[in-house]
Image: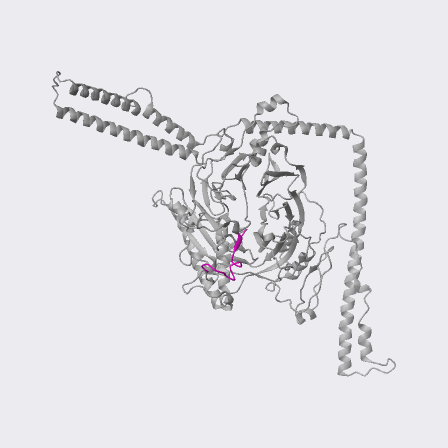
Amino acid sequence: MAKVVEEQLSWLSKPSTGYDLFSTPSTFTPSTPSDSTSGVSPKRLIATRGSEIFVGRGNKVRCADLQDLKARHPGLDVVAEEAKKVGHREYKALNIPQIDFEIRQLEISQDDLYLAIVGEKEVAVCVLPGEGFLKRDAARPVVPHFHRIGRGHHNVDTGARIVRVLWHPLSVEGASLIVLTADGYVRTYDFLIGNDLSFEVPDQSLDLYALGGRKRHVGGFAADSDEMEPAACCFGSGEQSWRPLTLYILMRSGDMYSLSPIVPSRWDAPQGYIQRLSLEITAEQSFDEQTTPEAKVTNRHQTKWINDVLNQRQNIVNAQTSFDTPKGLTPTCLMRPTVVGPTPVLQGPFLFEPAPPEPMGDDLPAACDIFHLEVGPIGVIGIIYSNGKLDICLEEEPITAKWIGKKGMKSLETQNLPMISHYETVNLPFNAGEGSKHSSWPTFTRDPHSAQMLFVNSIIGVTLFSMKGWLSKLEAVLDDQEDDDFLVKTLQKAPRTQIQEICATPGFPVEGCTVLYEAYIGYIIIAKLPDGFSSKAFDEPDSFLPFEDSNDTITLQPSSRRFAEYTETSFNSSRFGQSESSFSMSTKSQSQRKSAPPIPVPQPLNILQPPYKPSPKFTKPSNLPGFLHSISRDAKKPIVFTAETLRHLENARDTLSTEFSALMTGAQEMYDRAAAQRLEYSKQLEALHNIHARLSTIKTRNVSERVEAFITRQEEMQKRADALLKRLITESEVGLSDAEKKWAKEVDRISERVAGGDGLGALGSRTLRVGDLVEDLVVAADEAVDSESVHDPVPAEIREGKLGMLMGLLEREGVLVESTRKKLEALIIECDRP
């Protein structure tokens, strides 16, 4: 767990730019009030790009560079003159006057180029200024491009409430935005700058009701409407199977579905991932004889799909290495395959085996958010509910890709529903009370340093939960390729998920949270509140607090698929503190039980092992007297050798051999342990002598003074490094790239051509001279017309022709100036792009 070393960061406290960034109230008043029937909705009002932070407040997107804020904040040891010299820089707001709705979510794309601005029912996307522009003096940085997304679907009048917006992790050449709405629609927008239609019309529109075999009800009461109301979604993590292309959808009822594959129109993936996916599909095809007809069809579709992708990849390689391809027509990314699909099958609802514990009472909590984590071949799925219940499940088999065929989709009852195993239930320390699903919507925030630690933003603050204890053991077992029995026992004995309260904000729900880990800023967390914020600084990402027992309910039970061969017996494990861990397993077949166990490989012994305990075989009574007694009831009578007697003697011999082998094994283990203890005792004596000699040598030196001098020197070097970093951040300017230098030269050349000096080649000077000449001619013509006594020797037709020629020349010059001005504006916009 993380160790908090500073409460409420000083460089974000009042008075500071960071404090104003979060605390200054907004003057925005929405023209249309929020839909009161929608209840509570998720809020994610903080997004980060490196050290830059973007905060939604009202209809404004405030932004600042945290490095700049920390560098400009005077420390406690800085005098007033130096603090004044450092200066105070106000926070900035992106220049986006087109936003007329209250911001509820902010999402930055994976390439840090686009920012999705989400309202209750509206969505907009802007291109962010380049990194470093927030350090400039401009109070309102201009965004190069801004577009409203799907105004025909996402509007305040007829649009549905937006519950989640995601960027596709594999999209390239533009971006792919996933929009999930409360009415059960998943829309993907694959847009390109310059193509306005791509921002208005979704590339794919998936109706979850129709894909789930349900019919939509127009008005009136629908019995299953609550079951299909989406709450959140996320993409699978890692690179196993189809997980990077799988969208997991969580319903408010707690049901979970998946769509696979969700592929953008322009996408790309690492070559290694595509090759592994191809090998996996080929391996499944080799077992085609043992599968069902539906599985055979699915495998054929997957084979066609991956072959199309491999052909596209090969065409890209051939085009890049060939000189015959015309310049500008070389493909640079993969296109969505059209040989199958493109509509995926809605797989679900997921079956929980075993099922998580159900809460008591009539007012059931609502599911709010979901995360997916990959540990080797196993996936970890977490679901948070409105009352603080956190269910952690294990996904043993990844979701595979399925497409709707020409005959449509079959009924859900005939499908093989995906299955996941419930592993653990953690009750987080917050309770919204009755009706929590109408007042609480907790969300997850990932840790940038460790994927095994996540933060939960709730109505009372931020809570950290760490799964490192048992995930590290699970990962070690998976790397060693142990059998399933050992895997289950390891999970049974592993530490549980640990909980730590980070920010306590009772009565102030957290509207957004971000965790940063940067060399100069440190390891910090910032949580946005309705009227302020809370911030903490951690010591190190790998700092752990001791494991402590809690009263959380834990359920551990293997999936029926993975442990299908263990079906005979079961037992209960020991208790962990005040909670119980139920676990069921089975022994192997009867033939396997009769076979002699293999001799274990001796392991190296050391003092870190638990104290030696003699083998229980030494104290266990022998079964041999029972066999001998069964041979002859009366010991005085002679033994009659019959077939039954011989069989008893044979069993007695086997029993004696087995017990003797067990005793010899225990004796050998005891002897090995005694020998190891003698060797360890010798090593410890030698180590003690060495330490004593070193201690005597150290005592003769003045170690304490050397250590104090070293600490003083280290503090001085740290101060010099901090001062140098502050100077670099506050005084350095963003350098110009080669493209920007070329752009500056081009601007100077065109400026010289348009309005450079009084030379004859300057377009501006030529335009002015033509304008002056036209004015003189017009004045002369007016005077000639007004004066009747002056006879004009030039005919009127010739004069009008000359005037027409001059006007045409003036128009051509004006068109040339206007085109040059447009080129300048285009160059300026191109320069503003990151």
Magenta stretch holds residue 218: yes
In the picture provided, is 467 more to the left or to the right than 183? right
From what the image shows, is residue 538 above or below residue 472? above
Relative image position of residue 681 (x, y in whole percent): 81, 48
Colouring of the image: one colour
- Would residue 515 be seen by someone viewing this image from the given angle? no
Which quadrant of the figure contains the N terminus? Answer: top right
Relative image position of residue 810 (x, y in whole percent): 24, 27
Give the quadrant of residue 730. Answer: top right
Give the quadrant of residue 329. Answer: top left
Give the quadrant of residue 97. Answer: top left
Please, which residue is most extreme toward the top here?
A: 789
In the picture provided, is 271 more to the left or to the right than 680? left
Q: Residue at x 58, y 46 (%)?
A: 445
Q: How many marks?
A: 0
Relative image position of residue 815 (x, y in whole percent): 28, 31
- Would residue 587 be seen by someone viewing this image from the given angle? yes
Relative image position of residue 721 (x, y in whole percent): 62, 29
Span highlighted in magenta in the image:
217-237
Please, which residue is most extreme toward the right here?
A: 636
Q: Nearer the viewer, residue 240 or 113?
A: 113
From what the image shows, is residue 539 above or below residue 248? above
Q: Residue at x 79, y 42 (%)?
A: 687
Main SS type for the magenta part?
Answer: loop
Magenta stretch holds residue 296: no
Q: Nearer the viewer, residue 748 or 775?
A: 775
